[in-house]
Amino acid sequence: MNLLTVENISKSYGELTLFSNISFGINKDQKIALIAKNGSGKTSILNIISGKDTTETGQITKRKGIKVSFLEQEPDLNPNLTIEETIFDSGNEILEVIARYETASQHPEDQEAYQKAFEAMERYQAWDFETQYKQILFKLNLTELQLKVKVLSGGQKKRLALANALINKPDLLILDEPTNHLDLEMIEWLEVFFKKENCTLFMVTHDRYFLERVCNEIIELDNNQLYSYKGNYSYYLEKREARLEREAVEQHKDKILFKKELDWMRRQPKARTTKSKSRIDDFHEIKSRANKRRSEHEVQLELNMERLGSKIVELHKVSKAYGDKAMLDQFDYSFSKGERLGIIGKNGTGKSTFLNVLTGKENIDAGKIVIGETIKFGYYTQKGIVPKEGQKVIDAIRDYGDFIPLKKGRQISAQQLLERFLFDRKKQYDYIEKLSGGERKRLYLCIVLIQNPNFLILDEPTNDLDIVTLNVLESFLLDFPGCLIVVSHDRYFMDKIVDHLFIFKGNGAIQDFPGNYSDYRAYENSKLIEERELKTNETTTPEKTNWKEKDDSKKLSYLEQKEYNKLEKEIHKLEIEKIALQEKFTDDSLSGEEINTLSIELGELEQTIETKTERWFELGSILEG
């Protein structure tokens, strides 16, 4: 069933054309990702199909009566409402039923109003809905419901807007970078949520694991052409490569044909027949195809780096706290040459504080930090670039010199450097405040790197960068010979470039894990399974018996001994089934009916375990005398 159709839409700003006459459709249950380079107009497309912006040509056709929700990168929320008021202000009918019930519950003397509210809760099955929306708020760490929106951080506002969109269960959910401002646990929960929910998604995201695990179709906008791939990210990569190879072959054929046609054009007489006129038209089409150049514009990062000395950075018994909340607690660590460290942990556990004390932006409460004489930090922060009023792109680079040193004694001009960062000569004279979010990030990254750091710190560097730029950045970082620290919620990015992790647990506790993010998750999952099995064994394995000391006068018959041994195995198996069944209750998408069914099943299972356990003890007591 088609929910929305995009026909021949276009958008331009002055002389810059972002896209023109592009068309596609969104059908029910599709989970589509839009991929394009920064500055290609991805956010503009989302704004147009959500109704926040208009198209210059063509039209958007929506199925009558469908509900559309749009998660923007910077949500527009009422600053005077609380978190709870924002949720209830969304116009959701079931939420209004819940609100009326909660109001009636506070006035029990009005029995008629309470009865009506109670019946409405039953009619709309609002009990289950209330449980689900509170679970969503809990998963997104929005538990302080009375906080005003105006005091929330940018990340909290984004999570609140996401919660609103999920709770309202729209027919079509449009998402602009949904994983930004989410920690790793939240992203993994959101992946599971989207996989289980029967929802239709159209999104822009650079999170490649998210693309792999959630999306079932990818649309690529490349040189104003749309290409559709009916699969996830791996499928997209495979088919895109095949397409580029085909295009290269076709372009080669076109070049040969163009050369033949050019010879013919030079030889042909001035008096042209109808036949020759047709051929001339064909010639111009072939010429257009033959001269078409793929503008991949891959960033080439080969900047020089100052030599690292024997001493890098040492932390001795470092402590840092805000009031009673410890961020670092007598932390000891010495960095080595070429170290590649990833940092993960929930928001508020001290990740950014660690980077700030390391670079001297914040003072420590106790301990000592020793920085080697040769160390030159390059610190890419979440705040990004703060442009001077009226500053152009080229001016931001020239603040650091007209020429930049490269490896092997070479150098390039500021203009050439910007071209390597995908800013053509015309773009270099644009005002920085007019750049897209991704373009600003790219410029900021360029500014950090041209200062030739040998200890590079990147705090959420992947936000707003397109996949092409991410691949180039990853390639550079793999070759970077200095020390590297990365804080990122991009699991794919982390897996590719770090060798070990600091896991910030909170209250100053930091675990050093020897591996990347996927290694850590695999380790944690195996540890969880082992703990469950141990717990199961402890509850089902009887105390060892010294058989020689027992009175042989009381013995089990052959059949009873067989039954005893069989019961031991059966109870162990049932306990494992019970744990698996209990885990199903954590599924946020369960309906009230499904919860009731699971509850009945769990009750029956527990009764079976109890009956078998009683018989097992009865037989065991005979053995023990």
Image: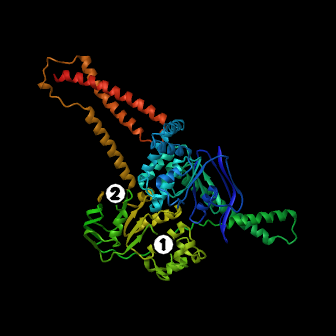
The quarter of the rendered structure image containing the C terminus is top left
In the image, residue 134 lies at what x, y percent? Answer: 45, 46
- CA separation, marks 1 and 2? 28 Å
Q: Is residue 175 left or right of residue 25?
A: left
Q: Quadrant of residue 240?
A: bottom right
The residue at which mark 1 appears reads as 385
Foreground pick, 498 / 615: 615
Q: Is residue 20 visible?
A: no
> Looking at the image, which residue is at 48% across and 72% down?
385
Amino acid type at image mark 2: Ile
The mark found on residue 243 in the picture is none
Q: Coloured how?
A: rainbow
Which mark is in front, 1 or 2?
Answer: 1
Query: In the rendered view, would you say 403 is above or below 337?
Result: below
Q: Label 2 near label 1: C-beta < 8 Å?
A: no
- The residue wearing badge 2 is 503
Percent from the top left, x then y, of residue 353?
35, 65
Residue at the spot 50% in from the left edge and 45% down from the top edge: 99
Q: Secondary structure at mark 2?
A: strand
Q: Residues within 10 Å of mark 2 (few under 14, many from 20)?
A: many
The kind of residue tagged 1 is Ile
The image shows residue 416 at horizontal and vertical percentages of 54, 77
**439 with respect to 5 (left or right):** left
At x 25%, y 18%, the residue is 560
Quadrant where the N terminus sits is top right
Give whichever of 486, 146 is nearer the camera. Answer: 146
Secondary element at image label 1: loop
